[in-house]
Amino acid sequence: MVDLNPLETLVVQSMRELGALSDEKKKTADDIAKKCNRPKSMVNNALVSLSDKGVIKRVAREKASGYYITAPK
């Protein structure tokens, strides 16, 4: 089990509520920040950390990158 800080936990919970559970259903940092009601810069930092921990996957796209949960919780 990966230890998550409170913001990372909130981001993962928000992604789950948005349905970002597969590559086909990935969400942008903007979508996640709006759902979390937190500044995008804070959410971006949490997304980088979660990606490094292997909890989420980042997919580079033409405009904004997409993110989805890879690890079950």
Image (cartoon, rainbow, N blue to C red):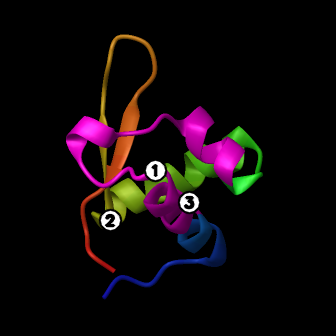
Q: In what quadrant of the picture does the C terminus appear?
A: bottom left
User: Is residue 14 covered in magenta?
Assistant: yes
Query: In the rendered view, would you say 27 is above or below 36?
Result: above
The range drawn in magenta is 11-35
Numbered circle sitting on residue 73? none
Which one is earlier in the sequence, the residue at label 1 or at label 2? 1
Please give the name of the residue rendered at 77% of the width and 44% of the height, measured from the top-left corner: 39
Residue 35, how many percent across, how many down?
A: 66, 50
From the viewer's side, name the closer residue of 18 and 46: 18
Question: Decide: marks 2, 3 in contact (CB < 8 A)?
Answer: no
| Secondary element at tag 2 | loop
Residue kind at label 2, given as amino acid type: Val
Residue 62, how many percent across, how many down?
A: 34, 11
- Circle 2: is it few (<14), some (14-19), or many (20+) Cα within 10 Å? many
Numbered circle sitting on residue 55? 2
Q: What is the spatial separation of the Cα atoms under label 1 and label 3, in whole angstroms?
A: 16 Å
Q: Which residue is mark 1?
A: 48
Numbered circle sitting on residue 14? 3
